[in-house]
Image: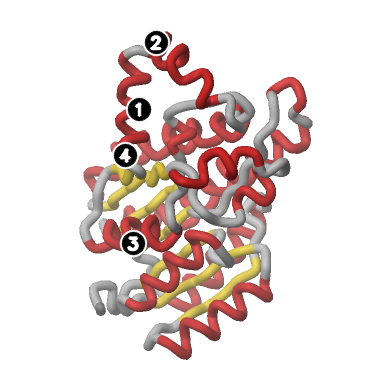
Amino acid sequence: MGRLTGKNIVITGASGGIGAEIARQAAANGANLALLARSADKLERLKGELESAYNSKVFIHKLDVSDTDQVEAAFARIYEEMGDIDILVNNAGFGIFRLAYEADIDEIKSMFDVNVIGLMACTSAVLPKMRARRSGHIINIASQAGKIATPKSSVYSATKHAVLGYTNSLRMEMSDFNVHVTSVNPGPIETNFFTIADESGSYVKNVKRWMLKPEYVAKKVVGSMVKPVREINLPGWMNAGSVFYALFPRLFELLGKKAFNQK
């Protein structure tokens, strides 16, 4: 408790799932929050919950991160309200599981606009000040899908590959400026993400026993705010699979073919 007292934290995609849970745990640790999402009603309810339970200031902004003009305006207001931003959590994102030949081009653009361009726009909004202050922490929620692509996730995996590439480069750029950069690579999480991603429900049914609890993922993310790390990979056994994949890709794809086609 209180480990983040006085810290100003911005969270995108904060209206539900791990974004909302990160907000709860950060507030419990004393942080002040700026919560961003497309659903103003959900943000209002979360703000009320947090301010009644914790001694934290909570600011909310309706934001579609795919609209870069909105991003610029929202972060300008946040700096006016909060002052310096200590930690940015880029959590906004979505996926749709579909075979590559069935993917609609507008759907593809939308996923890249939110998962990649939106993340970069939010990061660009805080980088100059963090760099000048020589202080800050950027946490990008990526995915194990960014390390291991599987059938029906070609576009989603491509966006998360992009996030990891961007994150790894950014980490090296910021290393001399005391700005920490963390990538979070979870496997499937028990959230409403799959309401959109998995319309048939078959994937959730097949992997439910392995799904991560959002509270657990959020705890790891909030822990990294206190003690920054390079990567958070969850669950550990799945990350071990990504290492095996890098070393023996042909064998991995052969052995994992049945499991990969469960979507």
SS assignment at label 2: helix
Residue bearing mark 2:
251
Cα distance, mark 4 to mark 1? 29 Å
Residue 245 point in image, percent of width and height: 37, 20
Cα distance, mark 4 to mark 2? 35 Å
Residue bearing mark 4:
173
Q: Are marks 4 and 3 in contact (CB under 8 Å)?
A: no
Q: Amino acid at mark 1?
A: Gly
SS assignment at label 4: helix
Of badges 1 and 3, nearer the viewer stands 1
Q: Amino acid at mark 2?
A: Leu
Q: Are marks 4 and 1 in contact (CB under 8 Å)?
A: no
Q: Which quadrant does the C terminus fall into?
A: top right
Q: Amino acid at mark 3?
A: Lys
Q: Mark 1 or 2 closer to N-term?
A: 1
SS assignment at label 1: helix
Cα distance, mark 1 to mark 3? 23 Å
Q: Are marks 4 and 2 in contact (CB under 8 Å)?
A: no
Q: Is residue 256 above or below residue 214?
A: above
Residue bearing mark 3:
219
Q: Mark 4 or 3 closer to N-term?
A: 4
Q: Mark 1 or 3 closer to N-term?
A: 3
Residue bearing mark 1:
241
Residue neighbourhood size for the residue with mark 4, other residues' Cα within 10 Å, grouped as few (<14), some (14–19), many (≥20): few
- Left or right: 171, with 121 as reference point: left
Residue 181 point in image, percent of width and height: 32, 47
